[in-house]
Amino acid sequence: MRISAIVLLTTIMASSVTAQEAFYMANEGVMVSDGDTRILFDPLYPESFGQYLLVPEEMRRALFAGEAPFDGVDAIFISHFHGDHFSPEDVLALMQAQTGIALYAPQQAVLAMRSIADGDQQSVFSRVHAVSLEYGDAPVTLEMDGLLVEAVRIPHSGWPTGRVDVENIVWRVTLNANSTVVHMGDADPNDEHFALDPEYWNRVNPDMAFPPYWFFSSQAGRSILENRVSAKRNVGIHVPQQIPADPLQRPVELRGADLFTIPGETRRLR
Ligand SMILES: [Zn+2]
């Protein structure tokens, strides 16, 4: 009895230490784990705009409480300051509740947090890393224990006529020098942006990329995924609710794509 209990516990712990996994929250909210190292992208936001899934209430509760699967989150990454990706209030409250979490976010998002933070909340900013990048700037690299963080500004979709002032960051993050993922925010699917620094994109073949689903809908988007981002696997995010989970019922250009559509679904990184 006792031996089987120890074997079971060991098995559970071993699997949690070796797991390299992506866990879908909603919209562009994704958690990536490599063993005990855990990061979140765009996990807290207020707006569905009538088309996108919100993070389920129980997931939000567990995140704020630091409970599984969100126990021991190391860092949060924000793609850009739009209501379907980021809530300054919620992220500030989470940083205050969970004092082991570091935040990486575009300057616009950090300024929004600073503008509403009260006296008690000032202390969280020692764990906040603002990235200030203009279009065309060289990517920046940041490091913390267990994480190599690379950031580049790729314009929001709608470029060059719309939303050009939005600081959209494409994050390339390597966990434990072992697993690399790319989260693209609302990147514009035009190769011009990626052709500015072919070396940067060539240097790494990530395990998994999370492009907004519209990258699968155009030849340019598919080519960027294949030739620039060059991840071994792509899982589309930001999928509107009206696009069915069943690939056969989707618009034809999305049938061959792997998409995150159901909160709580997972993919192994490899
Ligand atoms: Zn956006």
Image (tube, rainbow, N blue to C red):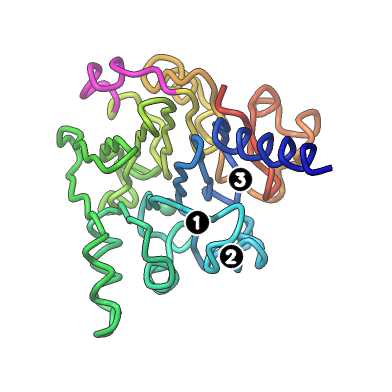
Residue contact between numbered discs 3 and 1, judged by CB atoms under 8 Å: no
Disc 3 to disc 2, C-alpha distance: 13 Å
Circle 1 residue: 43
Q: Quadrant of residue 90?
A: bottom left
For the record, the magenta segment spans 194-206
Say which residue appears at 53% left-offset and 35% top-offset: 214
User: Which residue was labeled with disc 3?
Assistant: 24
Upstream in sequence: badge 3 or badge 1: 3
**Residue occupying the point 43% across, 61% down:** 86
Q: Residues within 10 Å of mark 1 (few under 14, many from 20)?
A: many
What is the secondary structure assignment of the residue under circle 1? Answer: loop
Looking at numbered disc 3 in the image, what kind of residue is underneath it?
Answer: Tyr
Earlier sequence position, callout 3 versus callout 2: 3
- Amino acid carrying label 2: it is Arg
Q: Quadrant of the C terminus?
A: top right
Classify 10 Å Cα crowding around label 2: few (below 14), some (14-19), many (20 and above).
Answer: some
N-terminal-most mark, 1 or 2: 1
Above or below residue 244? Residue 226 is above
Residue 237 at what x, y percent from top left? 56, 41
Is 222 within the magenta? Answer: no
Point out the residue furthest to the front here: 2
